[in-house]
Image (tube, rainbow, N blue to C red):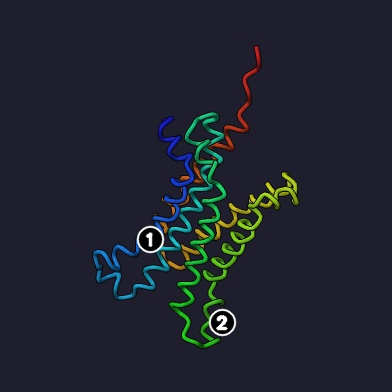
Amino acid sequence: MQTLARILRQPATAWSLVILPGLWPVWPLFVVPDFTVLTDPLKYILLYWGLVACVLLAVVLTFSPLRVLWPGAAVPLALNRHRRLVGVAACAYALLHLAAHTRHVYDGSFDTFLSELGKPFQLKGLAALGLLLVLSVTSLHWAVRRLGARRWKALHRLTYVAAALAAWHQIEARKVFPPQVLLIFGPVVVLQAARWWRERRPRAPLT
């Protein structure tokens, strides 16, 4: 475990783990062409980047519960060093998802743009993205100093709202079937429930 923790602690490892998954579309598009992907490559890319954004958002929400459930363990401590990077990466992939979607559906007509914005699943996705943008900007040290630790922590609890909106967006859009949404966000719910139980469990009296 110490070896794994040392590897995970390295910035190069963290950067690789957030960048390399986003490059996967290169494989079915250029390396080993997949004709089911090539029929509508931009749609494949936008759906894939949206999926990566959701996965990274779910992953970063597991870091704190893991640290609470296994205090002092090397691997959770190593993972928590990269909370900001993973959270900002989730926001970046969400922006790429939006850009690809806009390019995919926009035909130059303003009416098309307005009709897309009017769809309920789009509004939920945009709300989630808006929250992620705010959280990314305020993840910097100057924001912590300006807001104060208590207000900053309260603000960043909106990450859970963003995750719920992202899951709802995916389900309504039918881009990811609900079982896959459960696979992505289910572990977050389980770990958060375990954390809640751990933090509220009566402490053994000191002898």
The image's mark for residue 191 is none
According to the picture, the residue beneath numbered tag 1 turns out to be 23
Instruction: State if disc 2 and disc 1 touch (CB < 8 Å).
Output: no
Give the structural element (helix, strand or loop) at label 1: helix
Q: Amino acid at mark 2?
A: Leu
The part of the image, by quadrant, that contains residue 120 is bottom right
Question: In which quadrant is the N terminus drawn?
Answer: top left
Q: Left of 129 or right of it: where is 50? A: left
Q: Which sits earlier in the primary sequence, circle 1 or circle 2? A: 1
Q: CA distance from mark 1 to mark 2?
A: 31 Å
- For mark 2, does the 10 Å Cα neighbourhood hold few (<14), some (14 to 19), or many (20 or more) residues? few
- Which residue is found at the position 34% from the left and 72% from the top? 41
Q: Secondary structure at mark 2?
A: helix
| Residue position marked by numbered label 2 in the rendering | 114
Quadrant in the picture for residue 68: top right
Residue 149 is drawn in which quadrant? top right
Residue at 52%, 69% in the rendered image = 121
In front: 61, or 91?
91
Query: What residue type is disc 1 on?
Result: Leu
Q: Residue at left 45%, top 63%?
A: 50
